[in-house]
Amino acid sequence: MVWAQNVWMLYVGRILTGIASGVTSLVVPLYISEISHARVRGTIGTCVQLMVVSGIMGAYAAGLALDWRWLAVTCSVPPTLMLVLMCFMPETPRFLLSRGKRQEAEVALRFLRGPHAAVEWECDQIDGASLEKGHTLKMSDLWDPGVYRPLAVGVLMMLYQQFTGINAIMFYAETIFEDANFKSSDVATVIVAVVQVVFTAVAAMVMDRAGRKFLLILSGIAMSVSTGVFGVYFKLTSPIPNNSSDPKFLVLAQDLELHDQHELAWIALASMGLFIAGFALGWGPTPWLVMSEIFPVQVRGLASAICVLMNWTAAFIVTKTFQDLMDLLGSAGIFWLFSGLCALNVLFTIFCVPETKGKTLEEIQAHFKGTD
């Protein structure tokens, strides 16, 4: 993209970026879950989303001052750092043990836990609990409740995450603020990104104390309320219908409409802030974290790939259809639709999502198998 001379080079650059994003969104949460201790896995796992939203905020902020070519140069720095630094990181102990490489697993754990940690004991716990050396995935494995139950939870969490409308709202944030009559809509978008970073950091700090389910429920309620209020705002500020041809009446109606939009503009900003804060607290980081925790090792790669595929497919559908749905349902209607879907998120969390706080990956797998 930096050296693009025509639009097709930009398309190729975006395709490569999409492939890379798909790979990292799958591998990074799994890698972190497999190297983290159970007591801090939630905090460290949430840092994945914290880095994502920090990158979004940085891109928004840089976009205020840079043109697209220099923005591409700037965005090439983080992946370059990642490429260099990952050269010094070990393979995950669980992967090494699944391949029968006990000595290398102990070396990796010593690197991750420190030279005086009881790595032999942890290797014994991992090795004896759930790893099946040499096991290859078979179709019959899909009938195992330890496979299909977490797969159903993971896929539905990814779909529900996107059906909150987060990507559509973030991608169209500037347009939404323009519709809400904010003159500095680009600055307002940066403010939204800052709010997302702050509350994702809060989620990282409290994830292993509050638990996954509590934050998901709180997040769903906040998003449902905020999108519902956003719908009310657009309903109140929609054009006043009239059948009069009296010029004085038309001028008065326009004056009242502009006055209402100016007086109620704070509702739009507050609703957007509450939505982003709510998403960042729960439904932003938690589905990726839970996805990395719930699958048995023999299907973890395939099952996680299915979840990521569902997430990005739903993101594409929601983003692609957002403007069409807004034209069909109106600005108020589309936000009320998102509000109802967020309410469904809460019910889904209460009845279907297990609490994984403080549990080892092996204990979580035992829960789904019904042997805990």
Image (tube, grey):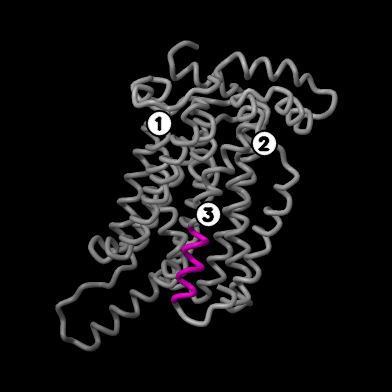
Instruction: Assess whether residue 328 is covered by the magenta stretch.
Output: no
At a point 40% along the width and 35% down the height, the residue shown is 346
Q: First in sequence: mark 1 or mark 3?
A: 3
Q: Amino acid at mark 1?
A: Leu
Image disc number at residue 21 = 3
Q: Amino acid at mark 3?
A: Ser
| Distance in Å between CA atoms under marks 1 and 3 | 22 Å
Q: Nearer the viewer, residue 246 or 109?
A: 109
Assess disc 3: are there few (<14), some (14-19) or many (≥20) residues with their C-alpha within 10 Å of its C-alpha. Answer: few
Q: First in sequence: mark 1 or mark 2?
A: 2
Q: Splitting the image into 4 quarters, where does residue 61 fall?
A: bottom right
User: Count the marks: how many?
Assistant: 3
- Tell me which segment is drawn in magenta: 8-18
Question: For the N terminus, which image quadrant?
Answer: bottom right
Q: Nearer the viewer, residue 134 or 116?
A: 134
Image disc number at residue 151 = 1
Residue 326 in view: yes
Residue 347: % across, % down: 36, 32
At a point 35% along the width and 50% down the height, the residue shown is 338
Q: Amino acid at mark 2?
A: Glu
Q: Splitting the image into 4 quarters, where does residue 105 fall?
A: top right
Q: What secondary structure characterizes most of the magenta part?
A: helix
Relative vertical location of residue 275 with respect to residue 295 in this rendering, above or below: below
| Distance in Å between CA atoms under marks 3 and 2 | 20 Å
Badge 3 marks a residue whose secondary structure is helix
Residue carrying label 2: 91
At a point 39% along the width and 27% down the height, the residue shown is 352
Residue 351 in view: no
Q: Is the C-beta separation of discs 3 and 2 under 8 Å?
A: no
Give the residue at the far right of this rendering.
116
